[in-house]
Image (cartoon, grey):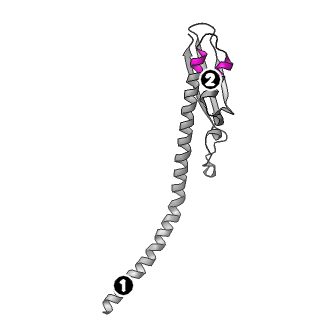
């Protein structure tokens, strides 16, 4: 009977020590896991916003290829495609061609902090000084 008691005491002691290691492992890995999840979330939002900018620049360039198009027509079409959050601080560069066959170029820039929540600034990746850009070139009709 004494052997059984000693074995159960050893088992109880091993279980208590292992619980402390598991807590320590969680405390060490949880911040890293949170950073990875924040990065995944933020970059997903940025990739989605980049896709919106590309689509808007294509629509703007297609509008600019039409005869009689003006820069205000192009801007109106781009603002129609972009969500209001992105179009608020948008910078736009439109180069209209004069004649049929000329190259038409539309460039759009949006600050990254307008598109994403800037979750990674504590680790040194700040979105304030960076921007998303898209440009499209087409031939005027």
Quarter of the figure with the C terminus: top right
Q: Quadrant of residue 138?
A: top right
On screen, residue 74 above or below 33: above
Q: Tell me if mark 2 has few (under 14), some (14-19) or many (20+) residues whose alpha carbon lies within 10 angstroms of its own.
A: some
Q: Residue at x 38, y 83 (%)?
A: 10
Q: Relative to the observer, which residue lies in front, 48 or 21?
A: 48
Q: Main secondary structure of the magenta part?
A: helix
| Mark linked to residue 127 | none
Determine whether 60 is above or below 25 in the image: above
- Which quadrant holds residue 110? top right
- Measured along the vertical axis of the image, is residue 17 above or below residue 48? below
Residue 78: x and y, percent?
62, 25
Q: Which element carries disc 2, helix, strand or loop?
A: helix
Is residue 65 on the magenta stretch? yes
Q: Earlier in the sequence, mark 1 or mark 2?
A: 1
Callout 1: SS: helix
**Residue 40 in magenta stretch:** no
Tag nearer the camera, 1 or 2: 2
Query: Which segment is the magenta one?
Result: 60-74
**Quadrant in which the N terminus is drawn:** bottom left
**Residue picked out by circle 2:** 77
Residue at x-position 55% and y-position 53%:
35
1 and 2 marks in contact (CB < 8 Å): no
> Could you say where residue 59 lies in the image, as x and y percent from the top left?
57, 23
99 relative to 30 in the view: left or right: right
Q: Is residue 127 above or below residue 57?
A: below
Q: CA distance from mark 1 to mark 2?
A: 76 Å
Residue bearing the label numbered 1: 8
Outermost residue toward the front in this view: 80
């Amino acid at each position: 009977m004494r052997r059984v008691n000693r074995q159960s005491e050893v088992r109880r002691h091993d279980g208590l020590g292992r619980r402390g290691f598991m807590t320590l492992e969680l405390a060490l890995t949880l911040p890293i896991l949170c950073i990875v999840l924040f990065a995944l979330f933020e970059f997903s939002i940025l990739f989605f916003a980049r896709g919106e900018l590309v689509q808007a620049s294509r629509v703007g360039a297609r509008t600019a290829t039409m005869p009689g198009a003006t820069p205000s027509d192009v801007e109106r079409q781009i603002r129609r495609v972009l969500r209001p959050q992105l179009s608020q601080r948008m910078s736009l560069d439109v180069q209209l061609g004069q004649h049929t066959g000329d190259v038409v170029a539309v460039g759009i820039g949006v600050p990254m902090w307008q598109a994403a929540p800037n979750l990674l600034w504590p680790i040194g990746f700040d979105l304030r000084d960076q921007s998303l850009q898209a440009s499209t070139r087409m031939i005027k009709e």
